Amino acid sequence: MFASAIIILGLSILGLAAPQPFPQPEKRARAQLITHCTVPKTAALTFDDGPYWYSYDASKILVANNATGTFFFNGNNYGCIYSADNVKRVKYVYDHGHQVASHTWGHKNLATLSWDKIHDEMWKVELALQRITGAYPAFMRPPYGSYNNLVLDASGARGQSVVTWDFDSGDSVGASVAQQKTNYNNLVNRRPNTILALNHEVYSSTVFQTLPYAIGKLKGAGYRLVTLAECLGKPAYQSVRAPEARTSAWKC
């Protein structure tokens, strides 16, 4: 205790700040919260909760329509991201020009977690995406769209922006395909300058029925269907390197 006091006194004399306990969440830069696109006449179709069976199909439908999407992947939600099939799905989506981003590891409500547990949910999926694709994501979508200042601080510490949406297709809350199409119709009729749309790739009806319809409506209304990064004019990743070879550490 006496030694610590001497150190602090010495630093004060030298005009230096005393050391602070680590970490101090309230001292960290808070993440930017993104709720909408900013580049005029762009629409970002985003897909949560994968990788899943329909990742390939969603990608193919987008590419066939000269569109790109953004896939917010979990690490261990509908299945382990490190399974052989899911690794192939993630790589396929990334290699076909879509953006991959974090939806955290286990799809937990981040606003109910401690600082350490929030970071645990974040870094594990970031590590998986970097191992599989080589890309370190610049964006994180909190499950359920639930966040608080601690979540924003943790994301800021990790160099990420937090993303929600300004349009929800309704697929995850039980909306029928007909209702989802109506939701897209109503959206287009409002003619917003930009669109940041929430969908979920884990429903076959979303991918095979709603998605083609939404693409047609949005393109017909003059929107460019781009990734989240493109609709913001920002980089999709904090860094990009070569993907890694599978090791025994690739497990959930």
Image (cartoon, rainbow, N blue to C red):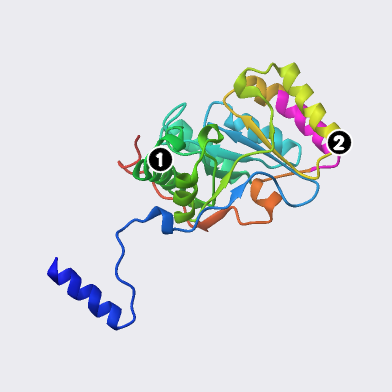
Callout 1: helix, strand or loop?
helix
Q: Which mark is on residue 220?
A: 2
Q: What percent of the width, then of the height, locates residue 143?
A: 51, 34
The numbered mark, 1 or 2, whose residue comes first in the sequence reads: 1
Other residues around mark 2 within 10 Å, as few (<14) / some (14–19) / many (≥20): few
Residue 221 belongs to magenta span: yes
Q: Amino acid at mark 1?
A: Glu
Q: Give the magenta-colored segment's residue range.
A: 210-223
Name the residue: 57% across, 33% down.
48
Q: What percent of the width, then of the height, locates residue 5?
A: 19, 71
Q: Amino acid at mark 2?
A: Gly
Quarter holding the N terminus?
bottom left
Q: Which residue is mark 1?
A: 121
106 relative position to 9: left or right: right
Using the image as rendered, state which of residue 218 and residue 142 is in the foreground.
Answer: 142
Asked if marks 1 and 2 touch (Cβ < 8 Å), the reply is no
Using the image as rendered, state which of residue 188 and residue 8 is in the foreground.
Answer: 8
Q: What percent of the width, then of the height, locates residue 148?
A: 49, 42
Asked whether residue 148 appears in the rendered view, the answer is: yes
Name the residue: 69% across, 38% down.
166
Name the residue: 71% across, 28% down.
211
Residue 78 belongs to magenta span: no
